[in-house]
């Protein structure tokens, strides 16, 4: 195995903006070595086949906790770090631009955590959903985060990719984390999130910002 392969790490991220009338901005992601993602994708595809599902989209399957917990346990069986960062916009001092300000701050903090989770000589690639609004917003957030926080994403991230979350298993896993992480942030606990992050040997970040 080459040293270049050893250095390839991938972060798949998703965001959730609103729930139950509260304005919550979140960015959530799973970070791992590329071979761990290969392992997850293979096992994810087998589980989908066994259950007769074309894909797992959490919002469509949220009424089936057993199903979500089964996939959460699968994610937990692989060495993937998780990052959940959120902010209630009511805490943002700059009311005129509070949504935009909160999104930039939360995004920058989440990306900083993800970069900190990988070995110092590694290369980090980022994959997000190819939904038009998400893709365009991601580029805007990269630019804003670099300008306002000094986060050097262009230098520290080797590539930014966009994928179809009905075909790309890592994005489905990130969607599951985002949904359950958001729910934990709202309710204080979430059994599916706890199952997702049950491994001791990997690191998990769960942070609420007050701006």
Image (spheres, helix red, strand yellow):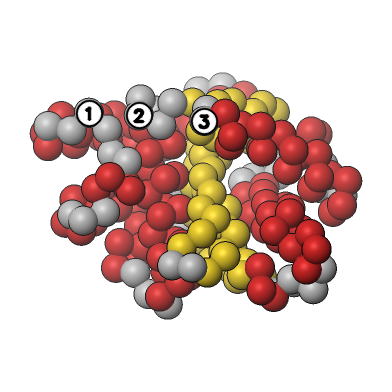
Pointer 2: residues within 10 angstroms few (<14), some, or many (20+)?
few
Q: Cα distance, mark 1 to mark 3?
A: 19 Å
Residue 18, above or below 89: above
What residue lies at 34% left-to-right and 69% top-to-bottom? 190
Residue 138 is situated, as x and y percent measured from the top left of the image, at 66, 38
In the rendered structure, which disc, 3 or 2, sits on the residue that comes first in sequence? 3
List the residue tagged with mark 1. 54
Task: Classify residue 109 as left or right of residue 18.
Answer: right
Q: Cα distance, mark 1 to mark 2?
A: 8 Å
Residue 211 is situated, as x and y percent measured from the top left of the image, at 75, 71
Residue 59 is situated, as x and y percent measured from the top left of the image, at 33, 48
What residue lies at 18% left-to-right and 54% top-to-bottom? 64
Secondary structure at badge 3 equals: loop
Number of numbered discs visible in the structure rendering: 3
List the residue tagged with mark 3. 131
Pointer 1: residues within 10 angstroms few (<14), some, or many (20+)?
few
Residue 66, above or below 141: below
List the residue tagged with mark 2. 166
Secondary structure at badge 1 equals: loop
Pointer 3: residues within 10 angstroms few (<14), some, or many (20+)?
few
In the rendered structure, which disc, 1 or 2, sits on the residue that comes first in sequence? 1
Q: Are marks 1 and 2 in contact (CB under 8 Å)?
A: yes
Residue 157 is situated, as x and y percent measured from the top left of the image, at 71, 34
Q: Cα distance, mark 3 to mark 2?
A: 11 Å
Q: Are marks 1 and 3 in contact (CB under 8 Å)?
A: no
The image quadrant of residue 156 is: top right
Residue 109, above or below 189: above
What residue lies at 55% left-to-right and 55% top-to-bottom? 17
């Amino acid at each position: 195995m080459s040293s270049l392969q050893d250095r390839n790490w991938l972060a798949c991220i998703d965001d959730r903006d609103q729930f139950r009338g509260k304005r919550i901005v979140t960015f959530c992601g799973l970070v791992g070595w590329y071979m761990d993602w290969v392992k997850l994708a293979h096992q994810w595809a087998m589980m989908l086949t066994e259950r007769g599902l074309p894909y797992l989209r959490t919002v469509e399957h949220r009424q089936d906790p057993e199903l979500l917990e089964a996939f959460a346990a699968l994610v937990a069986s692989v060495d993937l770090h998780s990052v959940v960062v959120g902010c209630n916009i009511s805490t943002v001092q700059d009311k005129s631009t509070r949504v935009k300000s909160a999104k930039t701050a939360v995004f920058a903090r989440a990306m900083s955590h993800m970069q900190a989770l990988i070995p110092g000589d590694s290369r980090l690639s980022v994959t997000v959903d190819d939904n038009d609004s998400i893709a365009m917003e991601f580029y805007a957030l990269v630019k804003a985060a670099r300008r306002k926080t000094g986060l050097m994403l262009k230098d520290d991230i080797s590539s930014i990719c966009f994928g179809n979350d009905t075909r790309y298993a890592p994005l489905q896993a990130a969607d599951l984390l985002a949904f359950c992480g958001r729910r934990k942030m709202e309710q204080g606990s979430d059994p599916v999130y706890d199952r997702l992050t049950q491994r001791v040997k990997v690191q998990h970040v769960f942070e609420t910002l007050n701006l």
